[in-house]
Image: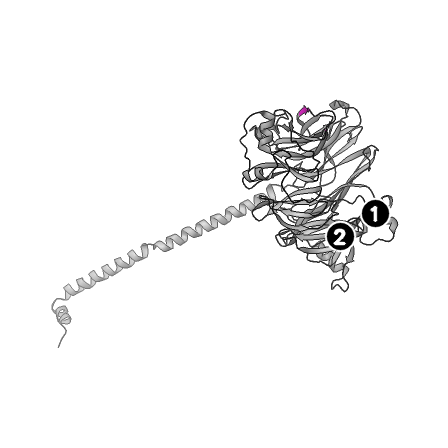
Amino acid sequence: MTDIKDLEAEIHPLKNEDRKLQEDLENRAKKEDILTRTPPQSRLSRCRAVAFFLSLFICLLVVFVVSFIIPCPDRPASQGTWRIHYNTAVTYDFLATEDVNRDRIQDVLFLYKSTNSSNSFINRSCADEGFSSPCTFVAAVSGANGSVLWERPAAQDGALVECAVPQPRDSGASSACILVGRPSSLIAVNSFTGETLWSRPSSFGGNASVLRPLLQVPDVDADGAPDLLVLTREDGEVHGYVHSGSTGHQIGRRGSLGVDGTSGSLLHVTRAGAPYILLPCAGSLCGYSVKGLYEKVTGRDSPLKKDPRWEGMLNATTHRLLLHSSGAVRFLMVVPGKAGEDLLLVSSEACKLLDGQDLAPRWTLSAAQVLRKPVLGYYKPDTWAVVIENGTGTDRQILLLDLSSGAVLWSQVLPGLPGDPQSASLPTADHRSAFFFWGLHELMGTNQMEPGDAQHSLYMFHPTLPSVLLELANVSANIITFHAVLFEPSRHAACLLLTGPASPDVPGLVSVAKHKVRDLILSSRVVHLAEGGPDSDETVRDRFSRLRYRSEA
């Protein structure tokens, strides 16, 4: 049977041709529409490609400009070792570091007493500042090469100094060095230029002896800088003088603390936010509320707090803290604790860690011969330890204690010599610390213990090599103070030595020297503390040389 469509095509041939032509035209129009219409995804891909190449072009242009058109700033060349001398001078137990010339390398600030400035370009004499000769100069030298950045007469004689004291924004200086001089003067100098910010006479009594250190206390007068508290001992009693940190003006009158104390005071803030002055006094530990002192010297109410718990522990008459008897207090330190700051107290009978709030002992170490201030560091990663130098002479022992428990982590007999400086530590990149001790590991004869024949030896220790010490240097000069300093982040640890005459009344040669730790390691002597160590001396030096250091901040 013939198909119906075929039959219709035979009957109406022209109609059939028209239909085919119509279908062809419709199909062709659909194809053209498909070809001319761009899919959305294709258009998006083109935009992405244009954005990518445009970004790439901009990046290449920036790299070209930075690399070839804008010159890179020259990195300051830092010498591994430098030394400067001051002839016919004396010096003080003070060293501070700050980036004075803003070259990203720490610079060195110190004091010396001499007739004239050592720098012919500065050439400022004692008479220029109204002092008789000799007088005390404050100096800043470059940490990179030891060149003098600035120096100026600041006092007739230095009593104590505190640097990195914040200043108000409108003062023109971000920080200052405050020098308390004898007789009766206070001066603030710009840490970066050495120019005078303010200078004031003090009202200390004629027979007053200034107690160290200078304390920074809360800014009650709201002038943008912490106030300054100078403690003096006059007629067997401690007095406090409060001065504005921004102008030096005395706030109120002299205030008596009612105790017979010594140097070594500190400011401790309880967990209730109340600041207290703590100081060694007559075989005990005394405390005084900063709020109470402000109100006493000014006669006005103070916005500061008192801690009811501490007020209950303080004797209202003697201001002594109710502690178990520990003998005369030699050192007092604020240390990190589990719930805030704690107190490390070293007395003539024991070393104690006290809870910072209720003063309950956390641990006690019987140590009756601790004659140098303890030093904090890390023996285990991110775990605080404390260095205790227990004993004197040939019986001296270095102890590293876990700060939280008092457990002995490491100990070593290291005979001490008269005039040995305090130990030091530097945090390392492995979250431990490198420790630096002074002494003499091997005594060749008894005459080496005599002060006149003593040669001080500097040793380096790292917890990853507990059976090894490195003897870095030997110094025969009289050491006034020693610091281990990170001059540049992670790359430039160095030892600073300030040497000078033993007596402040006999002028001589004063020297400030910097020695890069890595350079000292290369020429060091390896001291094996145990037999049969697995590492050769060269391997040990190499491991110490590869140490990287970090800043606490």
Q: Disc 2 marks which amino acid?
A: Gln
Q: In which quarter of the image is residue 110?
A: top right
Q: Position of residue 213 (x, y in %)?
A: 68, 35
In the figure, 150 relative to 546: above or below?
Answer: above
**Most foreground residue, 498 or 277:** 277
Q: Quadrant of residue 340?
A: top right
Reply yes or no: does residue 135 show up in magenta: no
CA separation in Å, label 2 and label 1: 19 Å
Q: Point out the image quarter for the N terminus.
A: bottom left
* Horizontal side, residue 247 vs residue 8: left or right: right
Reply yes or no: does residue 205 show up in magenta: yes
Of the two numbered discs 2 and 1 on the same chain, state the one appearing first in sequence.
2
**Most foreground residue, 369 or 20:** 369
Residue at coordinates 56% horizontally, 47% vertically from top-left? 339
Residue 62 visible in the picture: yes
* Horizontal side, residue 525 vs residue 350: left or right: right
Q: Position of residue 152 (x, y in %)?
A: 73, 29
Q: Disc 1 marks which amino acid?
A: Gln
Residue interval drawn in magenta = 199-208
The overriding secondary structure of the stretch rendered in magenta is loop
Q: Position of residue 146 (x, y in %)?
A: 74, 39
Which residue of the protein is positioned furthest toward the left in this rendering?
Answer: 11
Residue with the mark numbered 2: 397
Residue with the mark numbered 1: 455
Q: Where is residue 377 in the image (x, y as percent from the top left)?
A: 66, 49
The 10 Å Cα crowd at callout 2, few under 14, some 14 to 19, many 20 or more, is many
Q: What element carries label 2?
A: strand
